């Protein structure tokens, strides 16, 4: 039977077990203890579709649940702060060495909202094997493992296709100062939506990403010849000789090979000829080292709307990206997202398929938008400016890259390397873009689009991060009509045919409108 349970530390002493009182309808009602127990016991008592309301205060490990954190035990449960202000309720696991997860949601239709989690060992929030999780207005910070390389604010994890995370929605949350990731999707995550979240100053112990899709574990035994794990086995193969469009995909204990000529071969896992521990496909007289892509099936779609990632940094040679789409995540959509001042790429698409970036802004990063091996993605109505290296690139030193990138209606200006840099084997198509003042040049290994232009985009205040267009900007009315699905700009205004006779190039409309985005701070003036 569903119940609403209020939990309060009536003696206002962190470390003292909180109280919950039967029949309480507000925090003021909890004046004497019916039950003196930890929060896990209170959540258990709420039952299926029950609600645990946590009254203001700071609660530490013993008050949560010994060394294990709080774990949802019934479908439809809610854990929430009582005031709607995340900072009024703090669950502090900072003194807990054995607590890997502060909040664990492994049941369907769970809701977590309006509180702060801090100091976890591994993950602030871990969502696994369920459907319909909602997380809103939660701050998850300082989740740093005892050794470098782990720690995340929010993690979605499906360990098998039958135990996937589906239909999760994360809205208005903040992940900051975590050990590696702000938000991560790890294996078998489908139909996830991120809206208006902020990732700030993560990678505290290792290079990571503000937002990451990282479904496949990868190791580099030899930095010159990456080895990749196939499926859930301990079989490792060397990435070699697949030709410019070959890839290998692991699907439910099978391997699917798509060869250069389009032929597809599927064999069961374990039936490879591993005599030399090397797989050859379409071997020529002088085979070259290429990437064979191993991905988990069913990872995606993932949608990122109106999110911000900043101050992710590089550590021990591992890059810190703002948004990271890795290891074959498919059907990933970035829309109206802002990435700035990250030491890696603002947006990195590595081995992703059917990835789109619409009305995004990337500035002040090392690279604006970066594509890795076998990436397939499209950039539309973006602003990619003032990054210290390349604006948009399909290039990794030492490898012949295989990427398919389409770029339309995008301003690429003031970057410290190339505006657009392709690579041998990549297919870069650009048109209706504005390229200007990129230090190494506007294009390399990329043909000039017939309708692309150059010229000062006339931003309102580029140095201050305001990329609205001034009167007279050559980007006004110079874009390609992409249809009704893409008519709203970075700030949510209908931007095409609003003024003049054509579409704007870039992420922001002209004329500008006064609005302030709640998280990104991208005002329109």
Image (spheres, helix red, strand yellow):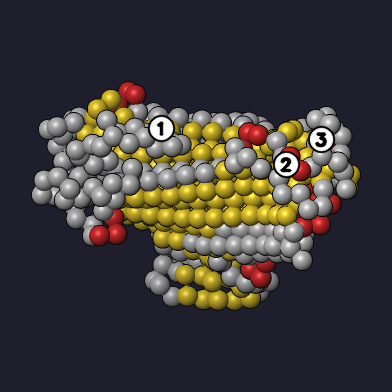
User: Which of the 4 image quadrants contains residue 374?
Assistant: bottom left
Q: Is residue 148 above or below residue 104?
A: above
Give the residue at the far left of this rendering: 501
The circle drawn on residue 27 is: 2
In terms of secondary structure, where does tag 1 sit?
loop
Find out whether the residues at labels 1 and 2 contact each other: C-beta distance under 8 Å.
Answer: no
Gap between marks 3 and 1, in whole Å?
A: 39 Å
Report the mark closest to the observer, 1 or 2: 2
Residue 477's spot in the image, x, y percent?
14, 45
Q: Quadrant of the C terminus?
A: top left
Q: Quadrant of the N terminus?
A: bottom right
Residue 141's spot in the image, x, y percent?
64, 35
Residue 197's spot in the image, x, y percent?
51, 43
Q: Residue at x 53, y 58 (%)?
A: 192
User: Which of the 4 image quadrants contains residue 249?
Assistant: bottom right
The circle drawn on residue 10 is: 3
Q: Earlier in the sequence, mark 3 or mark 1?
A: 3
Q: Which residue is mark 1?
A: 521
Q: Earlier in the sequence, mark 3 or mark 2?
A: 3
Q: Residue at x 73, y 55 (%)?
A: 4
The circle drawn on residue 162 is: none
> 289 left or right of 103?
left
Pick the front one: 379 or 198: 198
> 79 left or right of 415?
right
Q: Is residue 170 above or below residue 83?
A: below
Find out whether the residues at labels 3 and 2 contact each other: C-beta distance under 8 Å.
Answer: no
Gap between marks 3 and 2, in whole Å?
A: 10 Å
Residue 397's spot in the image, x, y percent?
45, 40
């Amino acid at each position: 039977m569903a119940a609403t349970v209020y939990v309060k530390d009536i003696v206002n002493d962190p470390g003292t077990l909180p109280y919950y009182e039967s029949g309480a309808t507000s925090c003021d009602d909890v004046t004497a203890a019916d039950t003196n127990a930890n929060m896990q016991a209170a959540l258990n008592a709420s039952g299926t579709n029950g609600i645990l309301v946590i009254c203001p205060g700071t609660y530490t490990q013993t008050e949560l649940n010994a060394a294990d954190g709080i774990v949802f035990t019934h479908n439809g449960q809610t854990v929430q702060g009582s005031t709607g202000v995340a900072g009024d309720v703090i669950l502090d696991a900072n003194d807990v060495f054995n607590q890997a997860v502060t909040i664990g949601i492994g049941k369907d239709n769970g809701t977590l909202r309006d509180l702060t989690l801090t100091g976890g060992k591994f993950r602030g929030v871990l969502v696994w094997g369920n459907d319909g999780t909602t997380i809103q207005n939660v701050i998850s910070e300082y989740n740093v493992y005892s050794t470098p390389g782990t720690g995340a604010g929010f993690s979605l994890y499906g360990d098998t296709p039958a135990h996937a995370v589906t239909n999760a929605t994360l809205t208005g949350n903040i992940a900051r100062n975590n050990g590696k990731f702000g938000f991560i999707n790890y294996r078998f995550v489908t139909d996830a939506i991120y809206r208006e979240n902020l990732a700030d100053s993560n990678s505290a112990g290792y290079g990571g990403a503000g937002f990451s899709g990282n479904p496949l574990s990868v190791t580099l035994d030899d930095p010159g010849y990456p080895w990749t794990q196939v499926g859930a086995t301990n079989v490792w193969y060397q990435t070699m000789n697949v030709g410019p469009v070959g890839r290998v995909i692991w699907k439910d204990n099978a391997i699917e090979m798509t060869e250069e000529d389009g032929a597809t071969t599927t064999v069961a896992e374990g039936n490879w000829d591993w005599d030399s521990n090397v797989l050859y496909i379409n071997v020529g007289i002088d085979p070259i080292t290429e990437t064979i892509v191993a991905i988990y099936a069913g990872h995606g779609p993932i949608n990122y709307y109106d999110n911000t990632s900043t101050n992710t940094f590089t550590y021990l040679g591992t890059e810190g990206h703002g948004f990271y789409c890795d290891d074959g995540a498919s059907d990933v959509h970035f829309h109206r997202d802002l990435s700035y001042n990250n030491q890696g790429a603002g947006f990195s698409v590595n081995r992703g398929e059917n990835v789109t970036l619409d009305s995004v802004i990337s500035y002040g990063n090392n690279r604006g938008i970066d594509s890795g091996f076998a990436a397939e993605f499209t950039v539309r109505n973006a602003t990619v400016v003032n990054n210290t290296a390349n604006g948009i690139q399909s290039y990794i030193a030492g490898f012949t890259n295989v990427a398919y990138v389409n770029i339309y209606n995008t301003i690429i200006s003031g970057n410290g390397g190339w505006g657009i840099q392709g690579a041998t084997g990549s297919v870069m198509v650009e048109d209706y873009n504005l390229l200007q003042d990129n230090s190494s040049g506007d294009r390399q290994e990329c043909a000039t689009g017939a309708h692309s232009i150059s010229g000062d985009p006339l931003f309102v205040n580029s140095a201050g991060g305001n990329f609205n267009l001034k009167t007279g900007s050559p980007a006004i009315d110079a874009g390609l009509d992409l249809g009704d699905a893409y008519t709203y700009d970075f700030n949510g205004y209908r931007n095409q045919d609003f003024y003049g006779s054509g579409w704007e190039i870039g992420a922001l409309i002209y004329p500008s409108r006064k609005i302030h985005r709640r998280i990104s701070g991208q005002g329109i003036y």
